[in-house]
Amino acid sequence: MYVVLFHSEASKAMPGHVRSGWAEFIGHGYLAVSFFFILSGFVLTWNYGDRWQEESYKCFLIARFARIYPVYLLALLMQLPFCLHDFHVWRALAVLLMIQSWTTMPSALPASLNYPSWTLSIEWSFYLCFPVLLSAVMRLRSRKLAVVSIILLTILIAGPQAGIGGRLS
């Protein structure tokens, strides 16, 4: 709901004396998407962390793909009539493969055909990386894990931001 309120600009409908605080709160609704990604990673780790040896990478990816792709494709098909005027084969292929958001450079690609689908593109990239990261994390001791986590987080945040012109604020 937080993301929906953010996109709906609901803060403009509030009375003037309430608007500034409400607008500040609603204006940060985009952060709920990041929170969802973190929560999703936590739930995946909770579910697979102790039984990963039993799960194969292939079975994991098939289960994740089956969970998100049918609805993803349905939403894309429903949106298609509204974006045929801006149809490009390469963009469509990137969207069909769920890789449209795998870029650090500013581009129109993540918003191609079905704008909200960029989040599922990111989620799919997390699913592809999850087994490898989980395996690595399970082998580390707590001190090494902390150091590696800090280094990875720094690279994940600073790297793309530097690549797109240092927009980290």
Image (tube, grey):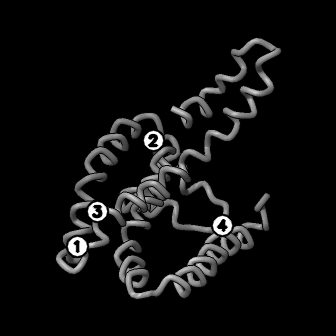
**To which residue does mark 2 refer?**
84
Q: Position of residue 169 (x, y in %)?
A: 79, 57
Residue drawn at point x = 57 percent, y = 79 percent: 146
**To which residue does mark 1 refer?**
51
Q: Is residue 148 left or right of residue 167?
A: left
Q: Mark 2 vs mark 4: which is more N-terminal?
A: 2
**To which residue does mark 4 refer?**
105
Q: Mark 2 vs mark 1: which is more N-terminal?
A: 1
Q: Is mark 1 in CB contact (under 8 Å) with mark 4?
A: no
Q: What is the CA distance from the residue labelled 3 to the residue labelled 2?
A: 40 Å
**To which residue does mark 3 refer?**
47
Crowding near the residue tagged with mark 2, few <14, some 14–19, many ≥20 C-alpha atoms within 10 Å: few
Residue drawn at point x = 49 percent, y = 53 percent: 118
Residue drawn at point x = 22 percent, y = 74 percent: 58
Crowding near the residue tagged with mark 1, few <14, some 14–19, many ≥20 C-alpha atoms within 10 Å: few
Q: What kind of element bears circle 3?
A: helix
**Residue 89 visible, this orientation:** no
